[in-house]
Amino acid sequence: MVNEEKILKDATKSDYKYGFVSKFNSETLEVGLNEDIIKKISLKKNEPEWMLNWRLKAYNIFLKMNEPTWANLSYKKIDLQKISYYSAPKTKKKLNSLDEVDPELLKTFKKLGISINEQKRLTGVAMDFVVDSVSVATSFKDKLSELGIIFCSISEAIQNHPDLVRKYIGSVVPIQDNYFSALNSAVFTDGSFCYIPKGVKCPMELSTYFRINQAGTGQFERTLLIADKDSYVSYLEGCTAPSRDENQLHAAVVELISLDGAEIKYSTVQNWYPGDKNGNGGVYNFVTKRGICYKNSKISWTQVETGSSVTWKYPSCILKGDNSIGEFFSVALTNNFQQADTGTKMIHIGKNSKSTIISKGISAGKSNGSYRGLVKIMKSAKNSRNFSQCDSLLMGDKCGSHTFPYIEVKNKSSKVEHEATTSKIGEDQIFYCNQRGIGTEEAIGLIVNGYCKDVLNKLPMEFAVEAQKLLSLSLEGSVG
Amino acid sequence: MEFKEYIKSTYEKLLFDSKINESNNMIKLREYSYEKYNLTGLPSLKNEEWKYTPINKFLKNNYLLQSFDKNEIKSFDITKFIIPNYNSFKIVLFNGEFLPKYSSKIENSKLFICDIKKFFKKNNTQLIDKNKYIFDKYFSKILTNKNSLCLLNNALINSGLYICIDENYIVEKPIEIINFNSFVNPEFSQTRNLILLKKNSKTEILERNISLSDSVSSVINSVSEINLEENARINYYKIQNDKINSLIDSTFINQYKSSVSNFGTYSLDGKLVRNNLYFYLSGSLAESNLNAITLIDKKSHVDHYTKVNHNISNCTSNQLYKGIYDGKSRGVFNGNILVEKNAQKTNAFQKNNNILLSKYAKIDTKPQLEIFADDVSCSHGCTVGQLDEKALFYLKSRGIPTKEAKALLMFAFCKDSLNTVNNIELRKYLLKIMSKKINVKLDLNEIIS
């Protein structure tokens, strides 16, 4: 028992690997939130008038809203007036190729383990890099455009594809949806935009890498992904930030539109700076992610949450069309003083709609992890089906794990199942491994990996490797 | 007059009387509770615990808070309402008022039952000092300040029961509390019970609400506190099949070492039924079992709220909630298990199964776990579904008519919850009223065995 405790202690002690700061020149707007700032952001991005008006409308709605307090989280209140809403690595001219990227920036990516060129050659993943407020590089653009796929930063999309943006932005996550989505709508600086045309299967994984670099800034990105009829896309998202004593705010909005017969697979490995061992600093992660499914379409969310000091995130599916499918697979690991309140919402509107929720929580140190989910079956959703499973694993006796599922059924032909368990790593399980010559450390690794396997299996290959690495990093010494 | 102001004026009137007649402690309690209540008022839909039950819809302005002139109790025939073969001490209440005249005579010093109001009085010589001390120690000690209806009850209590069972005493017959309601005007009545089981005692209690009027529908806000000392055991059953009145029932149970409580809530009718069950497991090896069957139709609304607090190690709790919803009925289950940091080796289970029979019925369920200890085994499960078509076909193909076949499946669905009722006569009675509810005639003995 003593030995086990020691291992747990060691396991939960590892440092954050991505905590460095890069020293490229950036241009940062003064701190504060007001109409002028929004106008300045809009001007900097050279946006059309409708976009500015949309932002201002969002700002006015935002002013009337209050910060939500219902989540099972406690954190210092965020002073929105002390944040700079725009920070961009300085670039002198428009880049023609990746070779012209600031070497310091390239170094950053190398440190993060994602050399752009290497990525290009080896894995064939098209990436969009967002540092602080702006997108700095997008690879594979030409190859994708041959298929008619649009993959670029959202600022570019506003310039080049205003019709698409105008039609879909705010259609899934309306401005007034919540406090953070309203804030994001007013001040978002960049993000990714992706459009897959009818019947096209995207031949490679699309990926966005988010990085907060500058101190005193917040990151507000907006992702819009539209899969037209019968298309398919797999999209990955990763994020890191430097170690700082202050709490930085990240409030993103992701909207997915899956038209008839389309399929979107959206995977996230979230690894924002989680704060140090005493709970100082770390990123506040307040994210609104939602997708809408039309007839016969499918949206699948997969997330591995290991970072952030506070996570508030509920990737959701609106199953509007008949026979639509929504899926949610999540591993949320909290350590030290981290807090996570995460889960999903499945709104069944169409007939025969199906949803699956698999959520695995691991709490260690003095952290708190909560699952909060809603399954809502509307009267029109005949023969709909839901299965949810939420398991929690507790490591150590100072952490907490909570489950708050909401199930609302208004239809007699639908079936809903929910089950949840909470347990610790069984002494008998470890004993079984020991017996077979596997050390306790390895055994814990084995058990945790096995516990998360259902979810890790859903990740694309490259990400699964990264996720496993991350898990082992966060519980260093135990997972191999 | 607004309801809020009406509550205020009633409270002030009551407090005026209270200051003349009642003990200082009681006056303080009323004042404190009203103040706290006033901060929040009645719970709205924005309150997480009342998210699915619009209490304001049921509590309209025209409810009286207290009929100062109590409706004259006419002699009524209690035999009409007794449960066949159920041999019990009958405690008869009328609009919450204890009526010794109609109740069973209890000639036993180890079982003490009286009107709770006696405890409020100033300089009460009627009560022996021992009981008075108990009252100071236990009354209103385990209520939560978050439930504003309990606070309102504290401020406005005007009727109820006190039951105390002495050490090492096993009550030979079940205690049956029958609360008859007959209000002249729709009333929002506040009743209050305090039950104390001392060391090694044991009893069974059955609680029923029966309305004598068939037109005046009132809302009953009932609060009970139950204390179980070491090794005490209680079986507590509630049958809620009052068509006319609405019921908001809050029960707080505090359990000490090795005590066992079995709770059965059977909700079969009512415009609104809200059950709040708060369990505090404060002694190790304590065990709580919560069972419920909800079988409703028409526009009934039944809301079960449970909160099981594991404060100490080695305790067990089981929750088994079954619901069948027909017509335009609405069911809510909001269960919460809280395991505190030092409550290691806790076993806590929660299960909620529901069947929707009609396309207008609705169910909202929220089974929650809050866990701060790592060496525990906790789980919850919840399902919503329909009667199995294949099983139904099997029965029909063997010559059983649809209605009876459905009823058989429904009874099978409820069976594990029903079998927790130890008293066979009570179980038979429950089956009888359930089959009456779904309008079938079945051989009960076959189902029970």
Image: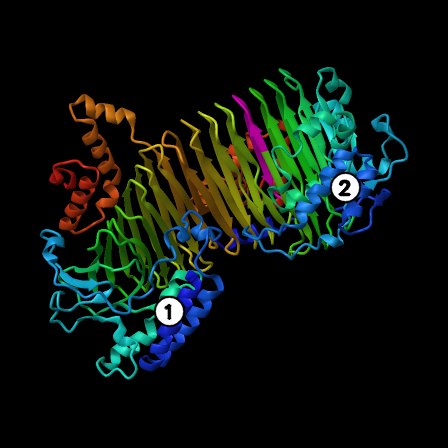
Q: Is residue A303 magenta?
A: yes
Does residue A262 appear to the left or right of B291 in the view shown? Answer: right
* Apparent side of residue A29 relative to residue A179 in the rendered image (left or right): right
Quadrant that contains the N terminus of chain B = bottom left
Query: Where does residue A167 sit, x and y in percent of width and height?
Result: 67, 28
B299 or A14, which is in the foreground?
A: B299
What span is colored magenta in the figure? A291-306
Chain of the residue where label 1 is placed in the rendered structure: B
Residue at 13% x, 50% y: name it: B425
Which quarter of the figure has residue A27?
Answer: top right
Question: Which dot marks residue A132?
Answer: 2
Q: Say which quarter of the image contains residue B406.
A: top left
Using the image as rendered, state which of residue A454 and residue B351 is in the foreground: B351
Whole-percent x, y for residue B442 in the image: 14, 36
Residue A200 higher or lower than B207, as above or below: above
- Residue reaching furthest right? A92
Per the image, the residue denoted by label 1 is B10
**Is residue A300 covered in magenta?**
yes
Residue B84 x, y percent position in the rendering: 10, 51
